[in-house]
Image (cartoon, rainbow, N blue to C red):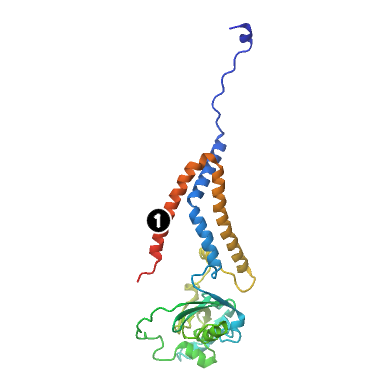
Amino acid sequence: MTPAESEHPTAPAPGPYRLPVRKRAMHAVRRAHMYCGLFLLPWAILYGVTGFLFNHPTAFADAPMKSFGAGELNDTPFALRPTSAGVAEQVVAALRGYGADARPLTVVEPEKARYTRDFAFATVRTDDQEISVLFDMTSPNGTIRPKPAAPRPPKKPDAPKPFAHGPRLDSTVARFVTEKPLDERVRDTVPMVLDRAGFPKGTVTVTSVPDLTFLATDGATTWRVTYNALAGTVSAAPAESAPPPDELTTRRFLTRMHLAHGFPGSTNTKWFWALIVDAMALVMVFWGASGLFMWWQVKASRKLGLVVLLLSAAAATALGLGMHEVLTPKS
């Protein structure tokens, strides 16, 4: 070793560079995020597209659909129906006619009387069409959806009705207070709406109306009363032991928010929620498309990412075909 070398010893060769643990962890998280996104790409696109279709029922409809509003409902029995509190008063007035020994009922907190669902439905059968009519209970809106008529099934004998040996409760309501029950209002309104919307008339069948629930007291007990206008039945249970059928628990609130869709007739909170649903649907499609572009920019991940995409396509195709089989009506 020369004197110069002894004065300036050679530095040891540097070892292999290793990223700090934090950076390695973040790198692994980013890769996992990307590969999970690539695998779930078909479902992200599916949820985005179907969310938009739920929010816009007339978009790409498999059957023609027409909306109607206040103009078609003007001066119809449905538009002139009493409030939910008014119907509760009618039901209680009719119940006073049953049972001489029964204590008279009185509606409690009538402002809390409400329908358990937001829609009423009817179908109209013509010679060559079956027309579904939806009425929105919360706004003067609805939809009409025609489709080719299916063969008529053989007629079955009528099932016994709740008040077969006496007046139906809703008939009693009509007799006592000269007001039509909800199902009759829907039935009488449908031909008027169809005529104003340019559709043919036919045989009207009311398939569903929401129940009305309210509180009433006989002086000793407060009852939660449920009135079904279509069946003409009333049921009741003590209020303290019978929570409202649509009591808004935290779980129900979250699931109902998830399912809420469609733009109401007025600009309110639900309208802005529907706007966010549209935004989320578009963003999910954008996430999917932009994720593909970002993946392709990372050359080191192209091969493995392509494998993940192929597995995703195979899984999505198999599940899609299986779900089509499950959801197809069986004859």
Instruction: Please state the horizontal and vertical placement of residue 224, each as a whole percent of the image.
Output: 50, 78
Q: Up-down: is 258 above or below 208?
A: above
SS type, badge 1? helix
Of 268 and 274, nearer the camera is 274
Residue 56 visible at all: yes
Of 139 and 287, nearer the camera is 287
Q: Residue at x 59, y 17 (%)?
A: 11
Q: Residue at x 51, y 59 (%)?
A: 47
Q: Quadrant of the N terminus?
A: top right
Instruction: Please state the horizontal and vertical placement of residue 195, each as a whole percent of the image.
Output: 55, 85
Q: Residue at x 36, y 81 (%)?
A: 153
Q: Quadrant of residue 111?
A: bottom right
The residue tagged 1 is: 318
Of 272 and 143, nearer the camera is 143
Residue 254 visible at all: no
| Number of residue marks | 1
Q: Up-down: is 164 above or below 235?
A: below
* Callout 1 amino acid: Ala
Q: Quadrant of the C terminus?
A: bottom left
Q: Quadrant of residue 15?
A: top right
Q: Quadrant of residue 85?
A: bottom right
Instruction: Please state the horizontal and vertical placement of residue 97, each as a whole percent of the image.
Output: 48, 91
Residue 184 located left or right of residue 314? right
Categorize mark 1 by other alpha carbons within 10 Å: few (<14), some (14-19), many (20+).
few
